[in-house]
Amino acid sequence: MRQVFSFALLLAAGPAVLMAAGPKTIAITGGKLLTVSHGTIENGVLVIADGKIAAVGEAGTVQVPAGAEIVDARGLTVYPGLIDPESNFGLTEISADEANNDLSERSDEIMPHMHVGDAFHGETELIPVARLNGITNAVVAPATDDSIAGQDIFIQLYGADREQMILGRDVALAMNYGADQRRRGGRGGHSEYPSTRMGLITQLRQTFLDVQDYMAKQSAPKKDDAKKDDTKKDEKDKPQKRDLKLEALIPYLKGERPVVIGVYEGYDVENIMALANEFHLKVILNHVTHSQDVLDKIAAWKVPVIVGPIYDFPKANERYDAVYTLPAELAKRGVKIAISSADAGGPVSSHSARNLPYAAGFAVAYGLPYDEALKAITLNVAEMFGFGDKLGSLDAGKMANVVLANGDPLDVRTEVKQVYVQGVAVPMVSRQTILRDEYSK
Amino acid sequence: MPHSVCLLAPVSRAARSFICLAIVAAAFAACGAQPATPADFVIQNATVMTASHGTIEHGTVWVHAGKIAGVGAQVNAPASATAIDGSGLWLTPGIIDPHSHSALDSDVNEATSPVTPAMHMIDAFDNRDKALYQALAGGVTTELLLHGSANMIGGQAVVIKNKFGLDRDAMLFPNAPGSIKFASGENPKRVYGSRDQLPSTRMGNFAVMRQAFEDAKAYMAEWDAYNAKAAKGDKTATAPKKDLKLEALADVLRGKLYVQIHCYRADEFLTEEAIAHEYGYKIRAFHHALEMYKVAGKIAPEDTAIATFADWWGYKDEAWDAIPWNAVMSLRKGVRVALKSDSNDHIRRLNQEAGKMVHYGGASEDEAIRMVTLNPAWIIGVDDRVGSIDVGKDADLVLWNQDPLSTYARAQKVFIDGDLFFDASLPGFGTPHFSGAMHGEDGFGGEDEEDGQ
């Protein structure tokens, strides 16, 4: 383990320049451990060493290393750091101030070569605010204007700089399909292609065919290998000019990395899945809040789903809980689900990412088993985005992203007492706590 | 009240008695807009969160003629009363939202002038909007439907009881006091500034307000002069023209309307109070009020309440210093605090927003539940009739499956004036008074009420 935290860390919390010690050996004892992977341990011990979970188990079964700092967690609940499957951390600060928004590139619908890592602003004040409620990791995605909006990063919500915070670049492709992407359509007025769903699908299919053509040309044998005697200069022998847009899509068309498809309506889900299956994309569905009629199909496709916002509005003649019950309905069908932190009625706003656990709790209120809900904001998200062996549960060998709270993590009344990221006790400070303390004097 | 249909005398606290209640109930029935008076019932053995006098474990509430007739561990209800078993359930007063824009089809800003006090929200009210149903299923029984914040003086609000399924007039809160919505800060200056019109700055905002009140004072003086002449029998006196805009502003100066002000910043609370003093009106509540924690000690003596968000922040500059401890910090300084939705989304789970106050600042359960019941009732001016479980108050009650301050609570039954308007155990919508097609406008989905952001 590199000593990633062994130097002074400049926190995002403005004036609070805080020192964080390097990872120590810590034993968290007496707490109720929600392991996510192997049940609940009522009186547990969790040992952290070198930034990783070294051991976890019932009191008495785990050796506490000599010299370990003992953290008394009696009366507290201990659980893995929460992971937000869709955020815009570091792409926005004050929503209404366009100058600091880097949310989407609207010049074209097909923008796979937009790398969120190029815009991510690690010092954003939004991150400490979310971290204080136990969010330690997140997927950062562009906004949803484009059919192909760009490539996501996977971050941890603490670190000296951007490089420490970004755990994975280009971990997934952000796609969107439905009414909102028809933004060139002017009803009864000026429109440009693509202005309809037919246009959107055709544009996507043509793009994927172009990528396949590009891949074929890349891998085609060079002329001088095939016909060594042919000295005639062929135009095609020139090195192929790199097309960054098409190149960006290659790993996704090879099925090497996941494609997150944001889509709401059932018939839109069917159409975009037909296209995705045609090109063998490795799909994660996102939203599906108005897709009650195709839940069985979603289960049959065996794709994971980021469901939500759970607060999305039902259609006019649906029962009030039609969306609230969706996580439970999908889980019941064996679908692997993640739950997102978004509010209803608008784009993702990571100002409210700290409410992620409450969205999961609300799913429990409407029928999702508790363990599934906790998994939907921890281990399932890690697995969907390729971090299942590093994050998402209290298991030996995983990064020590651990949260201590004074109660049930999914309840709005619960207060998080301490957050560890890679074994470092993160100062429980944000711009908001600084304001609170200043005006409490 | 210009918009209430039933011409009833307000039920004063002093006059509250069963004889009086019976008369009121009969009067409702005579109007034909209300359902028949429901039979007596008792909700037994529930955890009763009264909002006014603590929580009663294994409590019983007796409802007679749409009013709360008894509350306590033991209640002398007649044997004929229908019993509802509340074992393992929680009972609260109906949730009250003092800041909603639901069911208005987004017609919340007559943004053609910064001063439009003669606009009445009732004229845009769509009683079949699905947002009302979804709020009802979240336990919301009373809403103050307010103008947006494009204008410094937006117009007059309407108070509804969420009797979803009844006709429009039957949903109006009888004899509720009138409220008028003011705004300040970024929204008016953006709306008019973007057109190169006044106001485009905070200086402009307040200048527009002061001028409006100067106009109203001149108008009132004209009428006073005329009335004085007429009283003396002066036949040459001619009445000034009635002006709806100036009449409404005069009503503010006469103290006839509760002033509800959209306002975020600490400095602006102080400016607003200074202007209120200058012109002699009271500010009932600051809405949003995200920086109240900075000056709560100065505002508390004014007896101005706040209707704030639990934890929204950062959506615009004037929301940048918002902190989730605002509500409880302000409460501790003596300010009356309510939580509000300003959103068709959050209105469905205001009970959870109250629960967050236990976490952010350590509100007691009593204090937290008051933030979504009795305190918003005070802001609206109906706290003598709703907002707590007390004898004589309207039987607006919510039965929950779990502690309403937890994430896990679901409203099981919602009663308004003793009548069942939502029951989660019923198939379909769960609405005894509604079956049919709802209107599908989503209206506001969140992020303040800025129109057009």
Image (tube, rainbow, N blue to C red):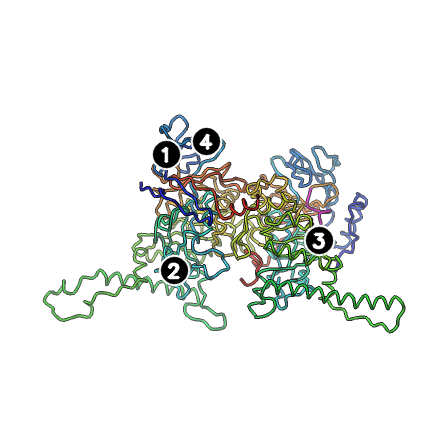
Disc 1 versus disc 4: distance between alpha carbons? 14 Å
Which is nearer the N-term, disc 2 or disc 1? 1
Instruction: Say which amino acid is labelled 3.
Output: Phe
Same chain for the residues under marks 1 and 4 in the image: yes
The residue positioned 20% from the left and 70% from the top of the image is A235
Chain part drawn in magenta = B381-388
Q: Position of residue B452 (x, y in %)?
A: 55, 63
Same chain for the residues under marks 3 and 4 in the image: no
Residue identifier under label 4: A72
Instruction: Say which amino acid is labelled 1.
Output: Thr
Per the rendering, the mark at residue A25 is 1
Chain for disc number 2: A
Assess whether residue B306 is covered by the magenta stretch.
Answer: no
Which is nearer the N-term, disc 1 or disc 4? 1
Q: Nearer the viewer, mark 3 or mark 4?
A: 4
Q: Extreme top residue here?
A: A60
Residue identifier under label 2: A148
Q: Are marks 3 and 4 in contact (CB under 8 Å)?
A: no
